[in-house]
């Protein structure tokens, strides 16, 4: 978890996704995925040529089913190739916020607050093992 906190102060240049779509099947639509672009992996690309991959994952917790979490891992090269257009980039990440939006007792949402006040939200959404990303404007 400390790794995500180390992204504060870094200059985010771009975000890339892999296969993606606007919505999940109607059987899975709820507040966890409303308004999110749905994907399965994304890359955060920083000015110092450092790339982080964010993926949905399962986290083992004793005496219960695995929880839905997020895996953040530094990579040496891109793992996905489709640019996710964020008009305000490049921009410094001022703050990183980790939370348990799904109530799973693990971190399953990252919010990257940019110097403009805009927020990039990355969340493990339903259906399980699916990732969502959206940008919230400061005045939204």
Image: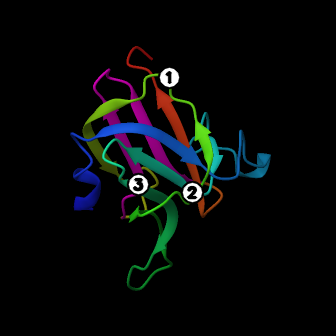
Q: Is residue 137 left or right of residue 81?
A: left
Camera-nearest label, 2 or 1:
1
Image: 26 above or below 1: above
- Marks 2 and 3 sit apart, C-alpha to C-alpha, by 13 Å
Q: Are marks 2 and 1 in contact (CB under 8 Å)?
A: no
Q: Are marks 3 and 1 in contact (CB under 8 Å)?
A: no
Q: Residue at x 42, y 63 (%)?
A: 75
Q: Nearer the viewer, residue 105 or 134?
A: 134
- Marks 3 and 1 sit apart, C-alpha to C-alpha, by 19 Å
Q: Residue at x 44, y 48 (%)?
A: 44
Q: Earlier in the sequence, mark 3 or mark 1?
A: 3
Q: Residue at x 50, y 42 (%)?
A: 15
Quadrant, the N terminus: bottom left
Image: 61 above or below 104: below
Q: Is residue 22 left or right of residue 87?
A: right
Residue 55, disc: none
Q: Earlier in the sequence, mark 2 or mark 1?
A: 2
Residue 87, disc: 1
Q: Residue furthest bottom?
A: 63
Q: Residues within 10 Å of mark 3 (few under 14, many from 20)?
A: many
Q: Position of residue 114 (x, y in %)?
A: 32, 30
Q: Which residue is tagged 3?
A: 51
Q: Position of residue 103 (x, y in %)?
A: 42, 57
SS state under label 3: strand
Quadrant, the C terminus: top left
Q: Are marks 2 and 3 in contact (CB under 8 Å)?
A: no
**Residue 88 found in image quarter:** top left
Q: Which residue is tagged 2?
A: 41
State yes or no: residue 5 in magenta. no
State yes or no: residue 111 in magenta. yes
Magenta-drawn stretch, dominant element (helix, strand or loop): strand
SS state under label 1: loop
């Amino acid at each position: 978890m400390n790794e995500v906190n180390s992204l504060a102060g870094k200059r985010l240049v771009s975000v890339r996704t892999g296969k993606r779509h606007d919505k999940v099947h109607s059987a899975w639509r709820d507040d966890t995925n409303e308004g999110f672009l749905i994907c399965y992996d994304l890359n955060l690309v920083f000015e110092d040529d450092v790339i982080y991959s964010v993926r949905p994952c399962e986290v083992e917790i004793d005496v219960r089913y695995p929880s839905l979490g997020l895996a953040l891992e530094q990579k040496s090269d891109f793992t996905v190739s489709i640019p996710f257009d964020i008009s305000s980039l490049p921009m410094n990440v001022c703050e990183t916020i980790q939370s348990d939006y799904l109530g799973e007792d693990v971190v399953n949402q990252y919010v990257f607050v940019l110097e403009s006040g805009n927020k990039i939200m990355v969340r493990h959404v339903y259906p399980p093992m699916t990732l969502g990303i959206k940008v919230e404007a400061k005045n939204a």
